[in-house]
Image (cartoon, helix red, strand yellow):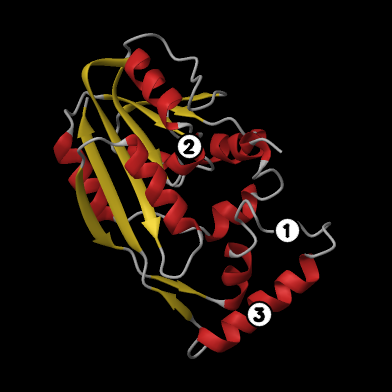
Amino acid sequence: MINTELFSGKAQKYADARPGYPDQAMDYIATLVPSNAIFADIGAGTGKFTIILARYGYELFAVEPNADMRELLTVELRPFNNVKIVAGTAETTTLPDHSIDVITCAQALHWFEPDEFRAECKRIGKPEYKVIGIHNVAPGEDSILNGSQRTHDFFRDPIVREFDNTISYTRKNWIKYMSSHAKDPLPSDPEYSAHIDMVNAMFDRESTDGLLIREVVTKVYYERC
């Protein structure tokens, strides 16, 4: 299965339970770019980060290859007339040459082919364009190592800032969260029942007073190209 389809059937759970991004991180990003910057948010997903950019009023292209994700993205961004949704990939965005001031990718860079994405950034970026990577890091998750490695593969000499993004999960949202990853089985898969048993056992083991706390850190990588 190619990366484009890995989240098919999981978009609603992703929208409901994946962590968003703290206001302090967006406030910091806003200091890095001009108020009239044109953004391309690559791998926009269901709009967890895209909607934050949209609220700031930036002209914005939201690029997302997965149809399920784009459907929810369209709903989330309906109130904003400063956003255009694009069915494209990180490596082939379909955006015009040299049209973008700032390229962002939130919780998505580890899915991209670094060299091909770098070449696409150079094609769509204006002179001295900026690339900003945003990644939520939760302790003990398998995706951290892979995500960090791809981030290091892509960025040459980034400025890195960290922001607290601690998340509290109820059992219901924990189950949704733990069913929203690419590797997580769908309800139609034979291993789904065992997976949910494991998720419930983890909640019982790690929660206190009905809440499971994850000390998530939002990392922002910034580089001028």
Q: Amino acid at mark 2?
A: Ala
Q: CA distance from mark 1 to mark 2?
A: 22 Å
Find the distance from the CA under tag 2 to the CA under tag 3: 30 Å
SS under mark 2: loop
In this view, the residue in front, 181 or 21, is 181
Kindly identify the residue that appears in the image at 53 percent across and 40 percent down.
45
Badge 3: few (under 14), some or many (20 or more) residues near its Cα, within 10 Å? some
Residue 200 is labelled as 3
User: Is the residue 198 above or below the residue 35 in the image?
Assistant: below
User: According to the image, label 1 marks what residue?
Assistant: 185
| Amino acid, disc 3 | Asn
Q: Nearer the viewer, residue 137 or 55?
A: 137
The quadrant of the image that shows the N terminus is: top right
Q: Nearer the viewer, residue 35 or 43?
A: 43
Residue at the top extreme of this rendering = 97
Q: Can you say which quadrant of the picture contains the C terminus? A: top left
Q: Secondary structure at mark 3?
A: helix
Binning the other alpha carbons within 10 Å of mark 1 as few (below 14), some (14 to 19) or many (20 upward) gives: some
Relative image position of residue 59 (x, y in whole percent) = 33, 24
